């Protein structure tokens, strides 16, 4: 009996050792495969590879993780690394205190404003700063991918006083109207505006839904995502699968914001306005108008300047305004009626594009940023005598 008991113990220990060996072997194999995958992606990154890590923000939903690195790669072979500043934006560090005689411009918007597709020196806001150095202009960028009008407005409320901004610029993108609506954006990570008779109210329910992002395990997950191309790529593919079905990359139609909505369904933020059901289109226009007008009112009340810098819909750029399937006519009408400054670089972008230089490719190209900046600089210089006089007074 004693021998049998000892044999059973030895057999049990042997089985545990085998199980442990199998688990350890599988674990080591997974580590080896991951290491090989990580090495391959760093040497030969696939189309759409990107590393981006967002930190929970109770005001606007999220911003880039401070002092992290954002990696971007497209199918042309462009591989861009950009450093995030201590506030969570793809820009250099800026002192809180403004130097005497400096005129500060803050740009607020989405992925066109974070501009990860080009080097920092080639972004429109840095080009503007260089071109306006004789005016002692300092440009600050507060762009985050996925932001709509509301998030940009809330962000400007946070930073206009903190950095003592003289001019607040809303960089308008054609998908912003859809991004403002919870049912269309379909994201649990942002605050949303709800249209009311006296304007709009803000739904902050995302705060409770995202409270887990303050936990240690989520910060560990963020750390892994920030430092692993393999993990970032796999998670991005999963995101596309969940949101769009069997889709492994963003298509050219997506980049041009040329989708078409089903009249019986809720539209996508990138869909052409003419394909939106009338009820959704009217609601989007009224809601975004309310946000813009409150934004303008807030800025004017502080004796600061407010302007909208328009990004044309790529597929509609060659058409006259009245023939464009875009939000441009609505935006022009809103700005004209309410005396909101609208800066439109469409004709400048088209002129360069006709010359053979591509201004759009997954957002602005380097040429696109230069032209976009040039249109803004032209407007600024043209109206600068009165502006500088008022500023000096």
Image (tube, grey):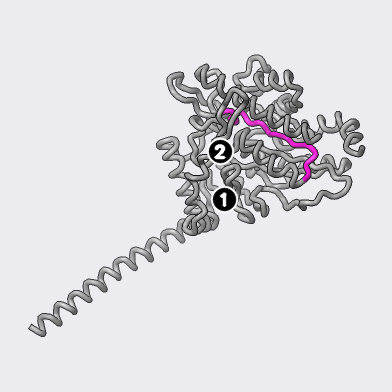
For residue 55, the mark is 1
Q: Is residue 172 magenta?
A: yes
Circle 1: is it few (<14), some (14-19), or many (20+) Cα within 10 Å? some
Residue 228 seen in render: no
On the image, numbered disc 2 is attached to which residue?
A: 191
**Furthest-bottom residue in this view:** 2
Q: Please report the bounds of the magenta region as a residue range.
A: 164-178
Query: 384 or 120: which is nearer to us?
Result: 384
Q: Position of residue 228 (x, y in %)?
A: 51, 56
Q: Position of residue 6 (x, y in %)?
A: 15, 82
Q: Residue at x 18, y 78 (%)?
A: 9
Q: 247 left or right of 104?
A: left
The picture quadrant where one finds residue 113 is top right
Closer to the chain start, of discs 2 and 1, is 1
Q: Position of residue 192 (x, y in %)?
A: 55, 34
Circles 2, 1 touching at the beta carbon (< 8 Å): no
**Furthest-front residue in this view:** 198
How much space separates mark 2 and mark 1, taking CA atoms?
15 Å
Q: Position of residue 344 (x, y in %)?
A: 73, 26
Query: 9 or 316: which is nearer to us?
Result: 9
**Furthest-top residue in this view:** 322
Circle 2: is it few (<14), some (14-19), or many (20+) Cα within 10 Å? many
Q: Is residue 128 magenta?
A: no
Image quarter of the N terminus: bottom left
Q: Residue at x 57, y 43 (%)?
A: 61
Q: Residue at x 62, y 36 (%)?
A: 363
The picture quadrant where one finds residue 169 is top right
Q: 389 left or right of 248?
A: right
Marks 2, 1: nearer the viewer: 2
Badge 2 element = loop
């Amino acid at each position: 009996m004693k021998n049998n008991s000892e044999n059973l113990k030895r057999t049990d220990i042997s089985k545990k050792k085998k199980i442990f060996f199998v688990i350890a072997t599988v674990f080591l194999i997974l580590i080896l495969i991951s290491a090989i995958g990580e090495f391959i992606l760093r040497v030969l990154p696939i189309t759409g590879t990107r590393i981006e890590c967002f930190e929970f923000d109770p005001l606007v939903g999220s911003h880039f993780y401070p002092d992290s690195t954002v990696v971007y790669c497209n199918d042309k072979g462009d591989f861009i690394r950009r450093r995030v500043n201590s506030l969570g934006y793809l820009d250099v560090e800026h002192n809180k205190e403004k130097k005497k005689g400096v005129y500060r411009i803050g740009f607020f918007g989405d992925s066109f404003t974070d501009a990860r597709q080009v080097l920092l020196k080639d972004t429109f806001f840095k080009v503007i700063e260089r071109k306006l150095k004789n005016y002692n202009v300092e440009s600050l960028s507060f762009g985050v991918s996925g932001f709509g009008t509301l998030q940009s407005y809330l962000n400007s409320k946070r930073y206009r006083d903190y950095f003592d901004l003289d001019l607040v610029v809303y960089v308008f993108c054609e998908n912003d109207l859809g991004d403002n609506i919870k049912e269309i954006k379909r994201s649990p990570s942002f605050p949303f505006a709800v249209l009311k008779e006296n304007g709009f109210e803000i739904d902050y329910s995302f705060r409770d839904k995202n409270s887990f992002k303050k936990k240690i395990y989520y910060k560990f997950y963020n750390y892994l995502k920030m430092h692993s191309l393999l993990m970032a790529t796999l998670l991005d593919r999963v995101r596309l699968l969940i949101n769009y079905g069997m889709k492994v990359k963003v298509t050219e139609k997506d980049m041009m914001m040329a989708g078409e909505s089903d009249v019986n369904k809720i539209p996508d933020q990138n869909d052409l306005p003419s394909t939106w059901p009338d009820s959704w289109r009217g609601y989007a226009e009224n809601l975004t108008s309310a946000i813009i007008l409150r934004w303008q009112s807030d800025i004017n009340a502080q004796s600061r300047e407010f302007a909208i810098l328009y990004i044309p819909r790529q597929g509609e750029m060659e058409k006259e305004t009245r023939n464009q399937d875009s939000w441009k006519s609505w935006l022009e009408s809103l700005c004209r009626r309410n005396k909101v400054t609208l800066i439109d670089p469409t004709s400048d972008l088209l002129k360069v594009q006709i010359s053979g230089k591509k201004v759009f490719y997954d957002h602005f190209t380097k040429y696109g940023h230069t032209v976009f900046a040039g249109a803004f600089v032209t407007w600024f210089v043209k109206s600068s005598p009165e502006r500088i006089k008022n500023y000096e007074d």
